[in-house]
Every structure is written in structure tokens, then in C-alpha cells.
Amino acid sequence: MARQFVVGVDIGGQTSKIGVVDTRGDVLAQSVIRTDTFGEDANAYIEALAEAVKACVAAADKTMEDIRGIGVGAPNGNYYTGEVAFAPNLAWAAKEAVPLAKKLSEACGVPVSLTNDANAAAVGEMAYGAARGMKNFIMITLGTGVGSGIVVDGKVLYGHDGFAGELGHTCVVRHNGRTCGCGKTGCLEAYCSAIGISRTAREWLEASGQPTPLRELQNITSKDIYDAAKQGDNFALRLFDYTGTLLGQSFADFVAFSAPEAIVLFGGLARAKEFLYEPMKRAMEDNLLKIWKGKVEIIFSELKESDAAILGASALAWEL
Amino acid sequence: MARQFVVGVDIGGQTSKIGVVDTRGDVLAQSVIRTDTFGEDANAYIEALAEAVKACVAAADKTMEDIRGIGVGAPNGNYYTGEVAFAPNLAWAAKEAVPLAKKLSEACGVPVSLTNDANAAAVGEMAYGAARGMKNFIMITLGTGVGSGIVVDGKVLYGHDGFAGELGHTCVVRHNGRTCGCGKTGCLEAYCSAIGISRTAREWLEASGQPTPLRELQNITSKDIYDAAKQGDNFALRLFDYTGTLLGQSFADFVAFSAPEAIVLFGGLARAKEFLYEPMKRAMEDNLLKIWKGKVEIIFSELKESDAAILGASALAWEL
């Protein structure tokens, strides 16, 4: 009997989620461990992760003999090298390249495939979500940052070095753009992430006297802006309009690159669909070449957010 | 004995070049016909082209039995459909989609593969030129317009509809950008083509009183600007610096998309290498993420310009 199950691991800055998944994309068991309690000790983290994987497999009433492989999505995860390298949000991989795929594979006795979190999300969406049946699409994750996974002919585009698809760090504001976490200025991520829209809010509060409940808050989050927009606050609505417009302008350039069937959105900020869709779509259409006008969809992830990361990572493992 | 030769056809607005090519990339015979003397009669053009192909094969002392196939590069040529569609510079294909691959194949009795001219140049560069051995690179053609061919894992990226790689129409000047031939504003092509740099020259002559020999000319071409720069004219040198800077900024975003090994430049304006390279390289490096700094080359085509288009198109035919 062939091995019928895979394990998906989603490594985030605070927690790592683990799930055992069957061929239909059902998550049979899942668990969570901390990512951030191992300091700079990568080996200690990987040991803990391997134990958690084995425990999760046992909790699903399976043994490691039933597992075809483990798929891992991690910030700065490199598909070619199997390393997590210089990831600012992972203390144990911030200063060096950690051969996570190799070590986890040795500890668990099954093959491991690694990629970055946005690529994993793209694979998950293609296998189980809104991009089922599509062979050419671009996944954009709108979370704390802006990530991307580009699918061409049914495969993730990795490029020469495995790092292709860093669309969050393409330039959206060329002159006088704000500084991004990456050190550059004017990046899409500095404007259109959860943090980006909050930065825009703070800038605009200083620049304008427009009344808004957001003015009362000490720390404005994207959730606060969403809630204000829900209540009809014009300032918050303008923030989404601006953010959506920048996204749509960028999407038009992305389309000129890989001619996708659709742009698929995922992540916390994408939940503000009702406020982002219209300006995104309008700005994208306004900036598309005629051959693409009206032909490229903007759609939203259909995966439950709690499962999506695990499913995406697990989908990688089927290719093993 | 297998068929050992291919035919390459490069369709331009004024002329179409035809060549018979062997496996080493040697052009055994070549000829030229007019593209622009058939009005809107696509069939008449294709008949003339088929006759010219047969004559060229005969001139190479071969018969059509020796020909494996014909590769064609044409503006707006679509690899998937084999059509040339809505090409503004081809009167016989400006208003409708012409099934050129099918009709030429019927007329010549061998298979025909069609793509756009920049993709053909990319294939030629990979088979015979500066990109030999590369599997991930981006070809940028700097001619009357700006074209691009994107190679991923050794294959041209065509996308969902066959039109991928229109990087000349990504936005390089977002605010108040000049109008492009495509109808959009701020496109790379409107600034960094042979026509684009001439437009910049005319704008700057009005805006500044800087003395320059270019001021005496009625019609400024990119060649005039090149000649002035050669003579040390500071105005012309500034034009190349500006044009190269915009190119380099755009290249950095292209790298974030497909993580290529190199950007390969081709076309008339690329001959101004000595003035464009330094600002291009500097602007690209300034705008790259750290993972790519110092790692992506900007190189120039190694193909003779007269052969390059034919070789590029012919290389397509080997895949038939």
C-alpha cells in the first residue's frame, strides 16, 4: 500500500502549525508549537518540531510508515537548498542559513520539501482552493508583510536561486517612498500590508484634520481601520481606497510579466475584501494593456485561514 | 536521414528577413522581402513569404524535404494560437487576428512555430548567444519600442494566453507619466526606447537652456544623441544617464519577479552600452533586495544584429 498521508508544517514567527493531511485535503490532526522559545538554537527547534510531527501523526492514528513526506512553508524558505536563511523574524535563522529540510528529514525518516510561506499558500490554493484547475496565477498574501507566489504552467516559479516572487518588494511609490523593513524605499509591502495601511493612517492623521474615530486610538491596527470602515467612517474608507489603488496598479504590472488567469489574495488584510476589491479592480483595469482588459480576475482565497497554511505546505509533500 | 535544417523568419514593420540555418547556428542563405506593400491583404503577404522561403531554401542548395520547420518572430505573434493579432505596425494584421502559422505551414508543407519578436530574440540568445547555458534570464529589446522575453527553467514564459512578457508596458513613471503608443501613460517603452529617449531630449531642450549640438537638429534620433554623447556633449550624456537609471530601476523589479541570472539587452539603443551600462547597473543595484545585490548580471547580446532575429526565430523551429 502506498503511503497515503502527508504532513504540512507552517512556520511563523511566533508559532509553528503542524497538520496530518489526506489526499482529499482533509486535516486529520493538527497541533501547534512555539517557534520563538529556542533563542538562536536551530537544532533545539528542529528537534522539538520533529517530536511534534511524530506526536501529530500518532494523534491521527497513523505511523511514520504511512507518511509520504513533510512539506514546510517558512519565511525565507528556499526550495532549492532546503534552507531557511536570514529570516529576520526567526531568531534561530536570522544570522545564518539553517538546513532545515535535511535535518527534519533525518529526524523524522521521511523526505522533506521546503519553500517560503507565500509559495506554500499558492500551492495550497492550487491543490485545494480558489485556484483549482488554474495553471497560471499569482498568489498575493496580504498579512504583516506582502508575500507572493507565482505559478506558471502549474508550477511555482523559483527562478535561478529559488527566491523568485518577492513582489512585496517591487516599487509602488518611486519618489519619496517610505522606508520598508527590507531597507529599500517605496516597496509595495511598506504601503499595502497590515502594517503599511496603519502607517498610512498615521501619516494622514497628521496631514489632515478630517474627523475619524481612529484619531482617539494610541495604536492603530488594520483591524481598527476595518472596524471604522464598517461603521462608515470616511477616513477609513479613503485608506482602503488608496491601498486598493496601489495594489491594483501593481497588479497590472504583474500581469504584464506573467499573463496570469487570476490574482489570488490571501491573508489578514485580504479579509477587508468589501473595501479593497473595487479600487483594486478599477486601478488594475485602468493600467492593463488592451489585450488583458476584462480578462484577469482578482479572487480571494477559499481556504479556511486556520487550515490554509498547513494545506499549502502539505501540498508540497505530494510531489515528493 | 533526419531533417537537418530550419528556416527562421523575422517579420518587421517594413521588411521580413528569411534565413536557412543549420544545427550550429550558421546561416546558409538569407533573403528579404517587403512587409508593407500588401496593404491589408494578409493572404497576399503570406503567399509572397512562402515563395521567398522556398527560394531561400533553394538558394541554400536544399529542398523543403531537408527542412524540419519554420520559426517565425513577429510583433504580437502568439505562440499558443499561431496568430498575429492587432499589430499596429502590420497593416495586414492591424485589424484582425491572422492565422499566420497555419497558413504558412499549409503553403510550405512543414510545421511552423510563431512567437513575438522579443521572445524569438530570447530563444536565439539562449541557443547561440550571450545566454548560452542559462536557464533563467530576461531578454530586453531596446529598439523603436521596448520588448521582453522571459526565460524560466530554460523555457519562454508565455502565461495563460501566450502574451506574457510585455515589460515595455510596465509603469516606470507613475505620476504625470507621458503617453505611450499603447494608450497608457508612464510605460517603460515611452521613456527607454529609441523613440523614448528622443522624446526626453525634446522635453529637456524646452525645459533647459543647456547648450548642446542637438538643439540645432529638426528631428532628433537616438543615433544623434549617441553621436553627441560620443563627442562628450553633457546634455546627451545626461539623457543616457536618465534613461539608464529608469531601466535599472525597472530591472530591479523584474528581478524580484523571476530571480533571473542575468538581464540580456539587445537592439539599436543597446548599442549605446558605453553610456547606458553604468547608470543601469547602479540603479538596479540600489533597488535590489539584499539577497540579489551583486548577483544579477546585465549583459549585452552577442549575436550579429543582422543574424540575430533570424537565428532567434529559427531556434524556435528546432522544437518542432
Image (tube, coloured by chain):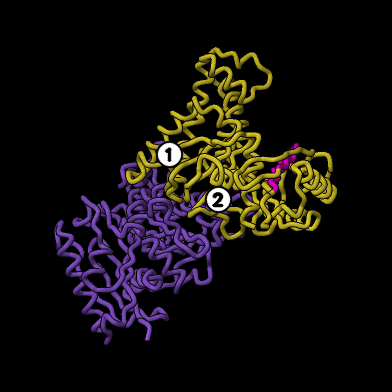
Chain colours: A yellow, B purple
Q: Nearer the viewer, residue B224 or A71?
A: A71
According to the picture, the residue beneath numbered tag 1 turns out to be: A297
A13 drawn magenta: yes
Res B218 seen here: no
Secondary structure mostly taken by the magenta-highlighted segment of the chain: strand
Q: SS at mark 2? A: helix
| 10 Å crowding of disc 1: few (<14), some (14-19), many (20+) | few
Question: Residue at the spot x=70%, y=48% of the render?
Answer: A7
B140 drawn magenta: no
Instruction: List x then y, in percent, for residue B205.
Output: 34, 47
Mark seen at residue B166: none
Q: Is residue A24 above or below residue B165?
A: above
Instruction: List x then y, in percent, for residue B165.
Output: 42, 54
Instruction: List x then y, in percent, for residue A273.
Output: 51, 28
Pointers 1 and 2 within a single chain: no
Q: Nearer the viewer, residue B211 or B146?
A: B146
Q: Which residue is at the far front?
A: A1
The quarter of the picture where the N terminus of chain B appears is bottom left
Question: Residue at the spot x=66%, y=16% of the render?
Answer: A217
| 10 Å crowding of disc 2: few (<14), some (14-19), many (20+) | many
The quarter of the picture where the C terminus of chain B appears is bottom left
Give the residue type that dot 1 points to.
Answer: Glu
Give the residue type that dot 2 points to.
Answer: Ala
The part of the image, by quadrant, that contains residue A113 is: bottom right
Name the chain under label 1: A
According to the picture, the residue beneath numbered tag 2 turns out to be: B256
Q: Is residue A243 above or below residue A180?
A: above
Q: Is residue B82 above or below residue B207?
A: below
The number of numbered discs placed on residues in the rendered structure image is 2
Q: Which residues are magenta?
A: A7-19
Please say if the residues under marks 1 and 2 sit with CB atoms less than 8 Å apart.
no
Res B119 seen here: yes
